[in-house]
Image (cartoon, grey):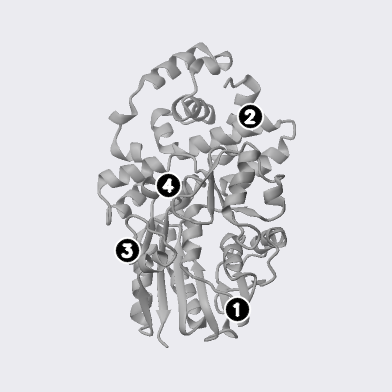
Amino acid sequence: MTIGRAQLEAIVEALTVVLPARQPADQVLKQFFRDHKSLGQKDRAIVADTVCAALRRRRLLEHLTPEGTPRQMALAAIVKAQGIGISQVEASLSADEKAWLSALKAEKVDALPFEIRVDLPDWVIEKLRKNHSDEEILAIGQSLQQPAPLDLRVNETKAPIEPVLDRLERDQIAARAMRYSPIGIRLRDKPALNQHVLFLEGVVEVQDEGSQILGMLLEARRGEMVVDFCAGAGGKTLQLGAAMGSSGRLYAFDVSEKRLANLGPRLKRSGLSNVFPQRISNENDAKVKRLRGKIDRVLVDAPCTGLGTLRRNPDLKWRQTAAGVVELNAKQTAILAAAGALVKPGGRLVYGTCSLLEEENEAVVTAFLAAHPEFRLIPCKDVLARKDIRIPGVEEYLRLLPNVHDTDGFFAAVMERAK
């Protein structure tokens, strides 16, 4: 792939606005492309891919580029992170840049310090050391440096998985059934699906395999009262609604009007009639309180650092801080307590995050159980076994890692309230 002068200039300009990391990178890039309407589809893809590569390997690239200018970062990302040959960008280089990149290309990454190879902030590495060896941390860090695959969930109310796989094959879209999720499909490449009939008719939705497994832990059933407490844009909400056969009542709570608005078109495509999106001001909103003790199953996909999703959101590792974890812990604790109050006797509560940190995961659950003796822990392994799902390393808790399971990083705990 040859990168021309105009494309390189666009990459440098995009990095100039993305690298300060004041806002989510995807939002900044969307605005950048709105401001640069002359960029074609191919140009935009090259810019986005290179910016993401620079964010995934930011610590390495800053180590290799002492001045750390956006142009140096762009060139280093192209040559070192993406592995593109110098000849493919040579026409845009000065003589000094060619010499510098040649030396850069030859430098062995394996000889660099551990923290650079892991490419995570020091505070994250220190927290991971509570539960992982340096060898494991290196494997986790390196797996998070890779782009995430494109995963789909099949809408059970519209089609079984086999005919969906057949249709993708007929349309020459390489795909396979997932390793763990029985309703999941993984695509080999990343085709534009937003105009494909399967997407337009709500037969498939984009959803990571780990997220699908988290949703299955709730075991939502027909005719039940269910709450998705932190619904966001509704990926797991739609999964739960389909598992309920579009029956019963499923409340999708979120504090963000914008996120719930994004659920609207997806909900319409899905054909589900049992989902009721509701914006709440906080976990103690009157809409929440009126459901206390009435709900069969509650899912809390809690706000967290998102460190398990760095393959998709590489800028998160540079926007999160150790102090931010303390603030998130307070939110997680309050939300889980409010969600637990909704569960009726004999009902189920599932707490999950896409974090890799013990403070956001086991520690929150342990504190909740100590404060709420009416709840007991149910091994995730036993819940998944009922669906004939067996995942290496999953026992009492769900712990998914990209280097082991090739999913986003996820944690979950299943709790049931005494009858």
**Which disc number belongs to residue 395?**
3
Give the residue type at disc 1. Answer: Gly
Q: Secondary structure at mark 2?
A: helix
**Residue drawn 28% across the image and 29% down it:** 111
**Residue drawn 63% across the image and 25% down it:** 7
Measured Cα–Cα span from mark 3 to mark 4? 18 Å
Measured Cα–Cα span from mark 4 to mark 1? 34 Å
The residue most toward the right is 37
**Which disc number belongs to residue 406?**
4
Res. 119 in view: no
Q: Secondary structure at mark 3?
A: loop
The part of the image, by quadrant, that contains residue 170 is top right
Figure check: 128 above or below 416? above
Task: Say which label, 1 or 3, has the lower sequence index.
Answer: 1
Task: Say which label, 4 or 1, has the lower sequence index.
Answer: 1
Q: Residues within 10 Å of mark 1 (few under 14, many from 20)?
A: some
**Which disc number belongs to residue 10?**
2
Measured Cα–Cα span from mark 1 to mark 3? 29 Å
**Residue drawn 49% across the image and 70% down it:** 219
Task: Say which label, 2 or 1, has the lower sequence index.
Answer: 2
Q: Secondary structure at mark 4?
A: loop
Figure check: 228 above or below 407? below
Task: Say which label, 2 or 3, has the lower sequence index.
Answer: 2
Give the residue type at disc 4. Answer: Asp
Measured Cα–Cα span from mark 2 to mark 1? 53 Å
Residue 313, position in %: x, y? 51, 47
Q: Which residue is mark 1?
A: 223
**Residue drawn 57% across the image and 38% down it:** 174
Residue situated in front as seen by the camera: 123 or 261? 261
| Horizontal side of residue 272 vs 416, given as left or right | right
Query: Which mark is in front, 1 or 3?
Result: 1
